[in-house]
Image (spheres, coloured by chain):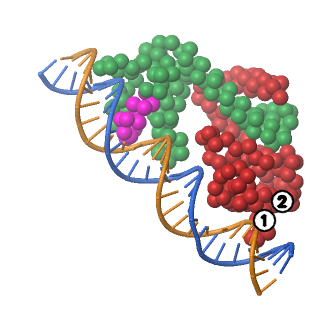
Chain colours: A red, B green, C orange, D blue
DNA sequence: CTAACTGTGTTAGTACGGATAATACACTTA
DNA sequence: TAAGTGTATTATCCGTACTAACACAGTTAG
């Protein structure tokens, strides 16, 4: 179900979070869909249940999923939370790179054309 | 000379690296300019000399500065290294955010307009 | 009712990286 | 020669990620 990179520097619980978010945002997982149980997912991807639990707890705190003791975890019926998370994250990433370019003395035009270049490269690659 | 944020999650040695790079890229520090000594800078910003040394060593390995035993450290006479570093970093940051948006199911147009929006916000803010 | 499954919480231990601390050595320069 | 440079080594402290082993509470199928 998920693709975990054990060699990446990114924490495992964050990888789980992001991939579940992506599955929801792209419509593969839909509102009210069942998620694998904490123990089941931990077994599937060969990590400790506590690490999965940490990811689920964070996702619930953000309103992306809902967990019920004894029953399981589901995709939240309301997708507005995940929309807000993505817009907020992408905006802050954009701000970060724009600030970086400004610190390097890049003009607005240069940043703009570099963005267009990379966007085209990424688009044609897939 | 530098502005260090001791509460930030970003490591101190990285903050030093980035700020020196920025000073060079924006022309405040010029090729062959003297840099403060390891011990002097450590005293100025109240951190351990080893942390400054680590930043300087990394900058030298990248070709941004040159250090000479017994004499001191200077901005590299050749600015091509720092140009390459910035372009490489900004490109990878752009790739990262574009990939993130793609994982969220965003269209190319939506990414593009969000970038334009944030760029204008950041530009008018300063 | 009971057993097996759920989520949740706690505590302990391991591993790693950032940062500090205290030196020591080699080189340059006034 | 003395003071200031870069460089290297070793030890220690701290926070975080992760694992491990539980215990507890709720649900559900038999």
Between residues A116 and A78, which one lies in front from this camera angle? A78
x and y percentages locating residue B65 in the rendered image: 45, 20
- Identify the residue under disc 2: A34
| Residue at (85% x, 51% y) in the render | A29
Specify which label sits upstream in the sequence, 1 or 2. Answer: 2
Between residues A126 and A76, which one lies in front from this camera angle? A126
Report, in whole angstroms, how far the alpha carbon at label 1 lies from the one at label 2. 8 Å
Q: Are marks 1 and 2 in contact (CB under 8 Å)?
A: yes
x and y percentages locating residue B39 in the rendered image: 33, 32
Residue range of the region highlighted in magenta in the rendering: B44-56
| Residue at (64% x, 56% y) in the render | A48
- Identify the residue under disc 1: A72
Residue B40 lies left or right of residue B9; in this view the side is left
The quadrant in which residue B110 appears is top right
Overall secondary structure of the magenta section: helix
Q: Secondary structure at mark 1?
A: strand
x and y percentages locating residue B2 in the rendered image: 46, 34
Chain ID for label 2?
A
């Amino acid at each position: 179900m998920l693709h975990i990179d054990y060699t990446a520097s990114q924490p495992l619980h964050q990888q789980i979070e992001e991939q579940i978010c992506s599955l929801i945002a792209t419509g593969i997982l839909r509102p009210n869909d069942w998620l694998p149980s904490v123990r089941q997912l931990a077994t599937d991807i060969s990590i400790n249940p506590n690490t999965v639990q940490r990811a689920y707890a964070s996702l619930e705190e953000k309103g992306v999923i809902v967990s019920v003791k004894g029953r399981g975890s589901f995709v939240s019926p309301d997708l507005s939370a995940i929309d807000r998370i993505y817009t907020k994250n992408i905006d802050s990433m954009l701000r970060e790179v724009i600030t970086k370019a400004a610190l390097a003395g890049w003009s607005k035009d240069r940043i703009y054309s570099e963005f267009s270049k990379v966007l085209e490269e990424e688009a044609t690659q897939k």
